[in-house]
Image (cartoon, rainbow, N blue to C red):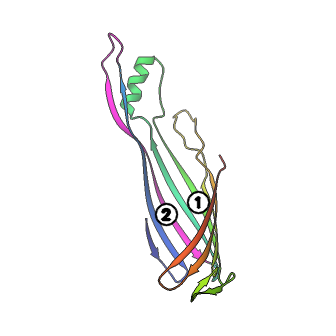
Amino acid sequence: TMMFPVGEDLNVSFAVTYLTTGETEVADTQPGGSGYERKWATYDIAVKGAGSLQLTDNLGVGIGMKYIHSLLAPPDVLEWLSRVTSTSVTGGSGQAWTIDLSLLYIWNNFINTDLFGMECFKTLRFGAALQNLGPEISYVENGGSDPLPRTLRLGLSLGLLEEEAHRLNLNIEMVKILI
């Protein structure tokens, strides 16, 4: 992830995420079979551009657009499966565009008590994000698709102890998969 300040209250960021389930192997081991063998790595890659804007001293919002490409099986494996099963096997890769929305509210001087020269309970932060909003990912060339994991995230962070060199926070996050 890279972030660039564009103005006093605006930041732009770019990120690339790569996920893999590791190596997958297919082999025709039937007596008299073709002897076909193939190994490949399944993966998902997401490229995201985002912007965040500080609306007030305490409130910021963000929006991001993401392109997702998923590879389940390469074309030559699908061709081999089509020959072996005598049916058309398609949809080894898919793609989708999604949008992420976020919000951050910071409550300064929440309680703010002093303990041994350190500020306690000074800052409370609340964050919310909706992820993967948009159409389903399409794997099959004939129009079939699968839902993306549309997700709601809510988080709280309470500054338990804060001083110039150290900070101790209590963080709580709730994640709900909507689809």
Q: Amino acid at mark 2?
A: Gly
Q: Secondary structure at mark 2?
A: strand
Say above or below: 110 vs 156: below
Relative depth, front residue between 62 and 41: 41
Q: Earlier in the sequence, mark 2 or mark 1?
A: 2
Where residue 53 sits in the image (x, y, percent)?
58, 75
Region in magenta? 29-54
Relative depth, front residue between 21 and 135: 21
Say above or below: 40 vs 116: above
Q: In percent of the image, x 49 and y 80: which residue is there?
A: 166
Q: In percent of the image, x 47 and y 30: which residue is there?
A: 90
Q: In percent of the image, x 31 and y 16: which residue is there?
A: 34
Total number of numbered discs in the rendering: 2
Where residue 127 sits in the image (x, y, percent)?
63, 68
Mark 1: few/some/many CA within 10 Å (<14, 14-19, 20+): some
Please give left or right for residue 65 compared with residue 125 in the image. Answer: left
Say above or below: 159 vs 97: below
Q: Amino acid at mark 1?
A: Asp
Magenta stretch: includes residue 109? no
In the image, which disc is placed on residue 100? 1
Q: Which residue is mark 2?
A: 49
